[in-house]
Image (spheres, rainbow, N blue to C red):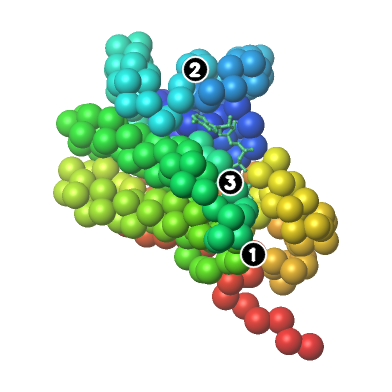
Amino acid sequence: MSRLQNKIALITGAANGIGEAAAVRFAAEGATVIATDIDEAAGKAVVERIKAAGGSGEFLAHDVTSEDAWVEVTDHVRTVHGRIDVLVNNAGIYLIAPLAETTVEDWNRLMAVNVTGTFLGMKHTALQMATAGGGAIINLSSIAGLVGVAGHTLYGASKGAVRTMSKDVAAEYAAAGVRVNSLHPTYVNTGMAAYGAATAGTTIEALGPVLSPLGRIAEPADVVNFLVFLASDETAYLTGSEYNLDGGGSTLLSVG
Ligand SMILES: NC(=O)c1ccc[n+]([C@@H]2O[C@H](COP(=O)([O-])OP(=O)(O)OC[C@H]3O[C@@H](n4cnc5c(N)ncnc54)[C@H](O)[C@@H]3O)[C@@H](O)[C@H]2O)c1
């Protein structure tokens, strides 16, 4: 397992869920992982697991909504590791609420993490990647950034913005060798999906056949398999693209 050998990979929201699984797997694939999050205790534990397994990485406390924090984190990584090859803009928050009950405070809080955080991540890495000869940025959007879902006006807007920002930056930096792609999962088995299922008055298990003809929601490993692929040199010709990771849920009809 060395598909990311010698790559310096910065993963936000790496203390839990998809980011945690990505950090552990990227390290197993040979990357040096800079795992960042606002959840310091869980983030440090992730990096301890990486090191115990013989991998390389460090944890940095990092609120993605703060431009000062992005400057601090990216300066640190360049000073200590020399460059950033891969950025996974994974940190995100979720809210399901009827349109009429969605407040401006909710809007600003969620947009700050999902949209401003992703914008700042690209702003503070793409130019340096270009100067170093290239790199890969992967932005976690959602199937909710592609299709309409009741109760998802705010979250869907944020993930739609992630989708289009990814293409804009991909266009701006393609000639410089910086690839930018967005990933669009359906529910993935993390705390976020558990919240979604509970809010809908159901369970993750019951939602599986509803959301996908494969009969289950995604596991973090399903997402991470694709993140490794997009971060690796195997995808040198892929940029500006969006990838559904939804078990066919948005494209296949189940009749009879
Ligand atoms: N789980 C799903 O069903 C699902 C589906 C589609 C897309 N996504 C997207 O995948 C990404 C990861 O989701 P997850 O399910 O692993 O969520 P999660 O809640 O398990 O983990 C999210 C992580 O982000 C961190 N975080 C939150 N605010 C932050 C901030 N301001 N700065 C830095 N870190 C912050 C949290 O501390 C947490 O560790 C998100 O962008 C989410 O929108 C998730």
The residue that label 2 is drawn on is: 61
Circle 3: residue type? Tyr
**Front residue of this view, candidates 166 and 107:** 107
In front: mark 2 or mark 3?
3
The vertical placement of 100 against 195, above or below, is: below
Q: Is residue 157 visible?
A: yes
Circle 2: residue type? Ala
Callout 2: SS: strand
The percent coordinates of residue 57 (x first, y second) are 51, 18
How far is disc 3 from disc 1 in space, using C-alphas? 21 Å
Residue at 34% from the left image edge and 51% from the top image edge: 166
In front: mark 3 or mark 1?
3
- Dot placed on the residue nearer the N-terminal end, 3 or 1: 3
The vertical placement of 187 against 224, above or below, is: below
The percent coordinates of residue 138 (x first, y second) are 41, 44
The residue that label 1 is drawn on is: 247
Which of the four quarters of the rendered structure image does ligand 1 lie in? Answer: top right
Image side of residue 152 versus residue 179, left or right:
right
Mark 3 C-beta closer than 8 Å to ligand 1: yes
The vertical placement of 122 against 167, above or below, is: above
Residue 94: assigned label: 3
How far is disc 2 from disc 1 in space, using C-alphas? 34 Å
Q: Quadrant of residue 176?
A: top left
Check disc 2: other Cα within 10 Å, few if <14, some if 14-19, many if 20+.
some
Residue at 58% from the left image edge and 71% from the top image edge: 250
Image side of residue 12 versus residue 25, left or right:
left
Callout 3: SS: loop
